[in-house]
Image (tube, rainbow, N blue to C red):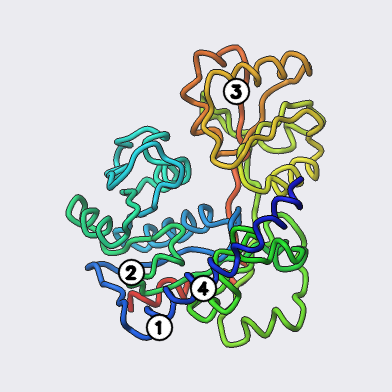
Amino acid sequence: MQLIVKILLLPFVPLYAFAIKVRNTLFDKGINKAEKVGAKVISVGNITVGGSGKTPTVIYITKLLKKHGVETGILSRGYMRKTKGYLLVSDGKKMLHNVEECGDEIYLAAQECGVPAAVSEKRVEGAKRFLKDVELQAIVLDDAFQHRWIYRDLNILLFDQRFLLESGNFERALLPAGRMREPFSAVKRADVVIINRKFSDKKALSGKLETLFENLPVFHAYYKATEIVDVKTGQSFSLEEFSGQKSLVVSGIAKPFSFLNVLEKNNIDIQNRLLFPDHKYYTEKEVEKIRKEFYASNSYSVLTTQKDAVKLTQFSRELDDIDIYFLKIEVAFEEEEKFNERILSIFN
């Protein structure tokens, strides 16, 4: 059925491609111009739809800048939030809006980093208002590769290794038939490319793909599963403590392959699972479904992602008789020292 839908959407691809080409040409020719906003700007984005690891990368960069004394904030569109316009999500000390008002990714990043955060569909306007609300030296833009109206001091482009190596022709088609927001030619706009293998082994790219990145610094990222955290108490446990246990695995993220893969590699039973669409906002209906499946499967606990955990916390009363944990992951870099130097070089 999915293949049939993709085939039916193929005639619309040239229209989308033409619109993208015209827009990019206007910027490339200087007719449309990016605007500086009064702080250093680091953009983290991709040219595909689906999880490539933007949020963990935003968290990594933000923590790095914070560690080096740079007053840093995070600005996002707030994808799938139930509000519009500009919102100050956090002042760096406390969260000012709930997860549904601002979006799960920015809520997680702000909470994890303890820095000011804001959302705005219009990045230039949002950045200017953000800088009026809080004093910042740097703004990390989440998912902003296509938002060319705002000037960036560093433009980071992320790729999921599995997409580069295993995607079929349909996936590599432009929207709406495929997963690509822009053609591969857009790579030339990047200052830095990150290939994220997540929990998979590193694999060599084909010669054609290597040619795409030959004039760019390419860094190789991967995920580390650091601990399992009790959603209600915040208590941390090692992955070994969950080895052999039967958990109900709950996920509402794009491409949950890596999440399931790391659980399986650590001998955590993933047979019982509920997989929801990406950015799923849970309602009482889904919570009741989780409850029923938990008891029907005789599971020891519910095990979910950190992004899902921030949304399930609002149902603490409905889930008070169920132990819920999330897997905490961090992104790491094979060329960590060089990557850090590249990020910090824009402040020299």
The image quarter containing residue 276 is top right
Numbered disc in front, either 1 or 4: 4
Q: Residues within 10 Å of mark 1 (few under 14, many from 20)?
A: few
Numbered disc in front, either 2 or 4: 4
Numbered disc in front, either 1 or 3: 1
Residue at label 4?
Answer: 18
Mark 2: amino acid: Trp
Pick whichever of labels 4 and 3 is earlier in the sequence: 4
The disc label shown at residue 28, or none: 1
3D distance between C-alphas at marks 1 and 2: 12 Å
Mark 3: amino acid: Glu
In the image, 148 versus 330, the foreground residue is 148
Pick whichever of labels 2 and 3 is earlier in the sequence: 2
Residue appearing at x 31%, y 69% in the figure:
40
Pick whichever of labels 2 and 4 is earlier in the sequence: 4
At which x and y percent is residue 46?
54, 64
Residue at label 2?
Answer: 149
> Which element is circle 3 on?
helix
In the image, 311 versus 60, the foreground residue is 311
Note whether 189 is above or below 138 in the view shown: below
Residue appearing at x 52%, y 58% in the figure:
57
At which x and y percent is residue 258?
71, 49
Question: In the rendered image, is residue 117 in sight?
Answer: no
Mark 4: amino acid: Phe
Pick whichever of labels 1 and 2 is earlier in the sequence: 1
Mark 1: amino acid: Asp
Pick whichever of labels 1 and 3 is earlier in the sequence: 1
